[in-house]
Image (spheres, rainbow, N blue to C red):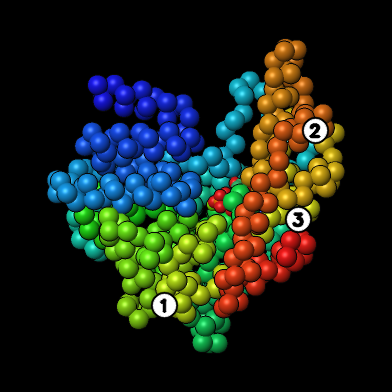
Amino acid sequence: MNDALIASLLRAVEAAPDDHALRLHLAEQLDGAGRSAEALSHVSIVLQQEPGNASALGMLGAISASMAATMAPQAPVAPAADAAPAGNQQNDTPPGYDWEAGSKELGSSLPAPFIEGRVPLHSDAGSDVPEAPIENPAGPGVTLDDVGGLQAVKDRLHESFLAPMRNAAIAKAFGKSLRGGLLLYGPPGCGKTFLARAVAGELKANFMSVTITDVVDSYIGETEKRLKAIFDQARKNAPTVLFIDEIDAIGIRRGSLTGSGAWMRQMVNQLLIEMDSLAGNNDGLYVLGATNHPWDLDEALLRPGRLDRTLLVTPPDAPARESILRYHLKNRPIAGIALEWIAAQTDGFSGADLEHVCTTAAEKAMMQSIERNEVLPLDMGHIRTALAEIKASTLPWLESARNVVRFSNQHGRYDDLSEYLVSQNML
Ligand SMILES: Nc1ncnc2c1ncn2[C@@H]1O[C@H](COP(=O)(O)OP(=O)(O)OP(=O)(O)O)[C@@H](O)[C@H]1O
Ligand SMILES: [Mg+2]
């Protein structure tokens, strides 16, 4: 009976991959049916997309407890195919259209879409460690020039590791060794992951990217081994930038973990050990983290030598919005698009919101084209209709962040956030 329920839930999740409550319900049923490894993979998918999801975090602990209780670990299950978050892949192109023609209007110097490859992890940590998938962004990718705005953040990335890595001899002469870490934080959809992809595009082979799904393993004790193996590989290929996306899912505040979350405590401990320059030779290893909840991170992660610098990735300003819009319209047939006007109307919109405006407008143009049986280009009418449907999404994050600045900024860690809120008349 449970099998039938699980089968229908699986179908429902396939149809609505972003419905987190539904996916967690499925995970609960799977765990109840003894299919803990599958349950874990679904919980991991939710955490990858929404690291602060309290129910998912609770379930992670419960599942690990039930696994520990049975002491009969199952084979780890690869994350479902729909695990990849709806990102900047532009594969929503309806068949049969000459989308290329449309891009001429915005010029041909636009960046090519990012293509991800995956390489296996070769580790010294022992042959029993499963190969963790590491994104290898070699190949055509975005570069920092493709990231709209965020000049201060780009400058900092340049100083921290891009310039020293490119000019190793000069850096050495000035006693600058590559080590330590930097935490990118900010509202959702404003380009943290996109920035990291751009860094990957700049560095190619010296860049590794991981998320919680690459780290968590259903075998007891394997999660720590995986983390160690990932760091070992990064050290072996030094100089390396190791990007940990949604790092609050891995480096969660230990005080918030209850009894059944003991294994997560081990994961955080291992992360601290690996990041600690005293524990191993971390010269040539730079850790770049990203989160939209830096205040949920374990405090020890932010100590000197670890992620000791934090950088705010702000919502895009008007010129940045223009360049983001240009990026997302480049493969679509367009006519008479006034980018500057759209940018002026979209204060508070994140990069993801702007992408949503472009895809919604494209859908409207497509439906009209289907009705008329001829290709009508996307125009300002479609953009206006899309704008009427989509609201800026950065405000709730900025409002909740305001309390952090007011009550928990004793170390000055969030000074850039404070400055930004003042500039927006929000503080
Ligand atoms: N500054 C930018 N320049 C160009 N495109 C951007 C920029 N910011 C965001 N985008 C677009 O918005 C999409 C979403 O951004 P991204 O995934 O990097 O956000 P994020 O900050 O990592 O969000 P989250 O906190 O939810 O993980 C990107 O894929 C990209 O297409
Ligand atoms: Mg992200």
Q: Is residue 36 left or right of residue 102?
A: left
Residue under label 1:
283
Residue at 50% from the left image edge and 42% from the top image edge: 85
Front-most of 58 and 157? 58
Q: Label 2: state its secondary structure.
A: helix
Q: Is residue 207 visible?
A: no
- Judge whether 104 appears above or below 284 on screen: above
Give the CA distance from mark 2 to mark 1: 52 Å
From the top left corner, tell me how far across and down residue 123 is, in percent. 28, 60
| Picture quadrant where residue 377 is located | top right
Q: Label 1: state its secondary structure.
A: loop
CB under 8 Å between discs 3 and 2:
no
Residue at 34% from the left image edge and 42% from the top image edge: 41
| Picture quadrant where residue 405 is located | bottom right
Which amino acid type is marked by label 2?
Arg
From the top left corner, tell me how far across and down residue 384 is, in percent. 80, 33
